[in-house]
Amino acid sequence: MSQSTSAQRDALRRLWPAIGDYCAARGLSQGNLLGGNLGIPVDRVKLAAERNRQFMSRADLASRAGVTRDAVAKIENGVRSPTPAVLDALLTALSLTPDSLLLAAPRPS
């Protein structure tokens, strides 16, 4: 198993409960969300706000998370969603829990 595959698997183990809650609230299966190399939908506004609250630039967060500044920018701008490993690294760098950045479930009408 490659280190990348191992990192993805470890990240999924840590994120799985929060991903399960996210999927359950929307009637999705976790397999459908994560199948096909899809990223995990995060609240990009909260991500940027938390980064700014901690007085970090995108480059600072990228360095702490071990990703590129461009990756952080694309996630914050809604161009792409993070993979489980990238989300896990961002959460660790910001000292956040998974449910703090996963998009909130829609409210019943």
Image (cartoon, rainbow, N blue to C red):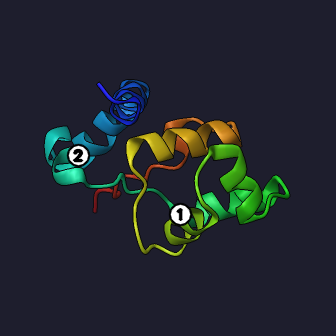
Amino acid of disc 2 = Leu
Picture quadrant where residue 17 is located: top left
Residue at horizontal 32%, vertical 44%?
22
Picture quadrant where residue 5 is located: top left
Q: Position of residue 95 (x, y in %)?
A: 69, 36
Does 22 sit above or below residue 53?
A: above
Asked if labels 2 and 1 touch by Cβ distance under 8 angstroms, the answer is no
Q: Using residue 78 as the reference point, say whether residue 5 is left or right of it.
A: left
Q: Nearer the viewer, residue 97 or 27?
A: 97
- Identify residue for label 2: 34
User: Secondary structure beneath disc 2?
Assistant: helix
Disc ID at residue 5: none
- Identify residue for label 1: 71
Does 72 sit above or below residue 96?
A: below
Amino acid of disc 1 = Ala
User: Secondary structure beneath disc 1?
Assistant: helix
Does 41 sit above or below residue 70?
A: above
Q: Using residue 35 as the reference point, say whether residue 81 is left or right of it.
A: right
Residue at horizontal 34%, vertical 30%?
2
Decide: few, some or many residues near mark 2? Use Cα within 10 Å; few <14, some 14-19, many ≥20: some
Picture quadrant where residue 51 is located: bottom right
Residue at horizontal 56%, vertical 40%?
89
Which of the two discs, 1 and 2, sits closer to the camera? Answer: 1
What is the count of numbered marks?
A: 2
- The C terminus sits in image quarter: bottom left
